[in-house]
Image: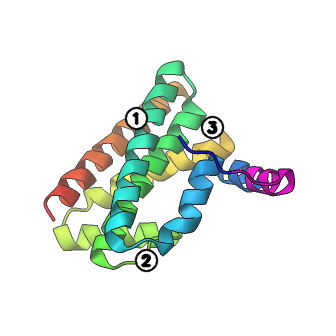
Amino acid sequence: MSIIKVTRDIYELLLVIARRKGKSIEELILESVIKELDPRMRLEAYRKLHEKYFREAEELYEKGDLVQAGEKYWGALVSLLNIIGEKENLPHYTHRDLREIVEFLTEKTNDPEYSRLFSSAEALHSNFYHNFMSRLSFNVHREDILKLIQKLKRLIEST
């Protein structure tokens, strides 16, 4: 691990933004610089980010922290959609962009399950902000996001 030194003022600004986004400072910095990387490096960064988010989601789920786990699952999903956006030359920077990628996949594959599973995944993302899900409900949405992640990984591997 390497260390970057910044002034206390800069650190606190980064911390405010990171907390607002539910991310670590490291993730915030990566998201800020990733657009400057060449396409191959961006794909690799998104792949590593997916693995990190997914691992953290599973750990948080095992600890019973459903709110944080749901947001990490969301991050893992978004990272895969970013890979698809890169490969298909589609924008992937806003929530709307992500929905449009899912609709693109639904049309391209003639598989409406992409759209349905993404809607379920959005509920986990929303739960991060509003904390409204019971464990039973969370588990159903978790199964959906896991299924969507697997579908996207297979799709990515086949292209």
Which marked residue is nearer to the observer: mark 2 or mark 1?
Answer: 2
Q: Which region is colored magenta?
A: 5-15
Name the residue nearer the viewer: 54 or 38: 38
**At 49% across and 74% down in the image, what residue appears?**
36
User: Disc 3 designates what residue?
Assistant: 132
Total of numbered circles in the picture? 3
Mark 3 and mark 1 lie on one chain; the one further toward the N terminus is: 3
Give yes or no for contact between labels 2 and 1 (Cβ–Cβ under 8 Å). Answer: no
User: Disc 1 designates what residue?
Assistant: 140
Name the residue nearer the viewer: 69 or 120: 69
Report crowding for label 2: few under 14, some 14 to 19, many 20 or more residues within 10 A (C-alpha). Answer: some
Horizontal and vertical percent position of residue 9: 86, 55
In the figure, is residue 94 to the left or right of 76? Answer: right
Separation of disc 2 and disc 1 at Cα? 29 Å
Mark 2 and mark 1 lie on one chain; the one further toward the N terminus is: 2
**At 76% across and 54% down in the image, what residue appears?**
6
Q: Is residue 26 above or below residue 112?
A: above
User: Disc 2 designates what residue?
Assistant: 91
Separation of disc 2 and disc 3 at Cα? 31 Å
Report crowding for label 3: few under 14, some 14 to 19, many 20 or more residues within 10 A (C-alpha). Answer: some
Separation of disc 3 and disc 1 at Cα? 14 Å
Name the residue nearer the viewer: 69 or 51: 51
- The dot on residue 103 is none
